[in-house]
Amino acid sequence: MSAGSAMRPHISVKALPCFNDNYCWLITNKAHNTTILVDPAEPSSVLPHIPKDLELCGSLTTHHHNDHAGGNVEIAGAFPGLSIIGGSQEGGKIPCASRLVDHGEVFELGGITITALHTPCHTRGHICYYIPAEEDSSPILFTGDTLFSGGCGRFFEGDSATMLSSFDRIMALPPSTQIFCGHEYVE
């Protein structure tokens, strides 16, 4: 699997740095004139970058920690009725969640088909979001705090066997999958 950017002609992914080492990801689907956020933890770093000419149709939250879900309240206030999605196994800890998804659940948002992958260990209900390949494009995975460029997330609510199981789930994806992590710790 490779870290990367740019994939389909009509879908792009842009990193919006948050705090010191976090990322919010802005997914744009030009074919549908829509955008989606992934983990918009710091609204002041995110809101100015949402294109005014495109519809923000949703926000994906990987897990309940404040450095990923902490911006949900402000984002929901700025975009009333916005679909905010999180993992059902987070036990109601995702602020402003309007939809909770289970492992393997496939849903559509902004003209993009997304599959929820339950990857517990960092938190019990951690979800990665997978966008399958289209035509000659690579699949895309947003890993939150499960997988990073140089390692994995801290074991807050799981153990090494749980993390290994989550990694096995990720490694079962096509090798061409482009990975977008929640933090950047490499120098």
Image (spheres, grey):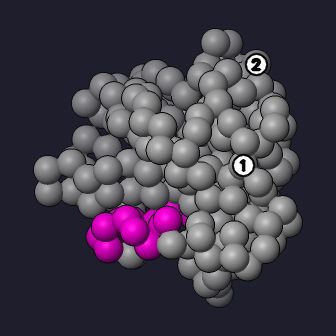
Type of amino acid under label 2: Gly
Give the residue displayed 48% in from the left and 37% down from the top: 105
Q: Tell me the quarter of the image containing the C terminus.
A: bottom right
Q: Is residue 178 magenta-colored?
A: yes
Q: Position of residue 97 (x, y in %)?
A: 72, 27
At which x and y percent is residue 4? Answer: 40, 68
Local packing at callout 1 (Cα closer than 10 Å; few below 14, some 14-19, many 20+) is: many
What type is the residue that disc 1 sits on? Answer: Gly
Who's the residue at 69% across and 76% down the image? 161
Membership of 172 in magenta stretch: yes
Q: Nearer the viewer, mark 1 or mark 2?
A: 1
- Stretch in magenta: 169-181
Q: Secondary structure at mark 2?
A: helix
106 sits left or right of 10 in the view: right
- State which tag comes first along the sequence, 1 or 2: 2
User: Residue 125: which disc?
Assistant: 1
